[in-house]
Image (tube, rainbow, N blue to C red):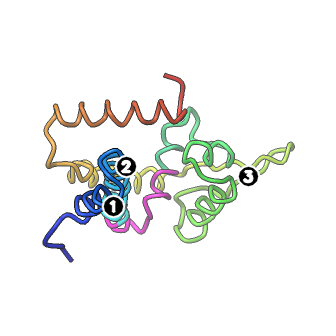
Amino acid sequence: MRLPFDPIARASQLWRDRWGEESHASSMATATSIMRVQQLLLAQFDAIAGRQGLTFARYEALVLLTFSRDGRLSMSRIGERLMVHPTSATNIVQRLVTARKGEIDKPFWVTNGGAFAVIADAGRAAMGAVTRDLEAADFGLSMLDAEQHDVLFGLLREVRVGAGDFEA
């Protein structure tokens, strides 16, 4: 349901009214906007991935495996790349093994106890179909032009660098 007003802009104004101009209302509004956009995009991505019987998280795991050198990654590496706990990565992979037929070969364990996921041809096909649909939807950002994409990416990259997400 669409609201007849921007609730984040209203919250920002109420914040300023209560605590004054120097109250970090702009930072609050920006952070809240980023989180809301993430929610909107994730809902759209989950719906798109759902057409192939996937969630966006499972799609991301298939992408990681597709981009890996030999089509396999350890659960710890999958968790690291998806920025989730290794237990969550294992759960994502196990759901791809049990809920979906043939997208990931049954994970195997090596002698040091590390578990690896291996992508199967069906996984590559499902990942490709979702990727085509995400591209057709312009990743939910068709309202931005190329210059706006560059500006937004640059700004968000600064935030990620500042938060220690990666080495610049």
Q: Confirm whether the magenta stretch covers residue 51.
A: yes
Q: Position of residue 162 (x, y in %)?
A: 48, 31
Residue nearer the viewer, 23 or 95: 23
Label 3 neighbourhood size at 10 Å, few (<14), some (14-19), many (20+)?
A: few
- Marks 2 and 1 in Cβ contact (< 8 Å): yes
Amino acid under disc 3? Phe
- Residue 23 appears left or right of 58: left
Quadrant for residue 52, please give it. Answer: bottom left
Query: Number of callouts in the render?
Result: 3
- Which residue of the protein is positioned furthest toward the right in this rendering? 111
Query: What segment carries the magenta color?
Result: 47-61
- Marks 3 and 1 in Cβ contact (< 8 Å): no
Quadrant for residue 148, please give it. Answer: top left
Q: Tell me the mark number nearer the camera, choosing from 2 and 3.
A: 2
Amino acid under disc 1? Arg
Q: Tell me the mark number nearer the camera, choosing from 3 and 1.
A: 1
Residue 18 is labelled as: 1
- Residue 136 appears left or right of 155: left
First in residue order: circle 2 vs circle 1: 1
Amino acid under disc 2? Ser
Secondary structure, mark 2, is loop
Label 1 neighbourhood size at 10 Å, few (<14), some (14-19), many (20+)?
A: few
Residue located beneath label 2 in the image:
23
Label 2 neighbourhood size at 10 Å, few (<14), some (14-19), many (20+)?
A: some
> Which residue is located at x 47 percent, y 30 percent?
161
Residue located beneath label 3 in the image:
108
First in residue order: circle 2 vs circle 3: 2
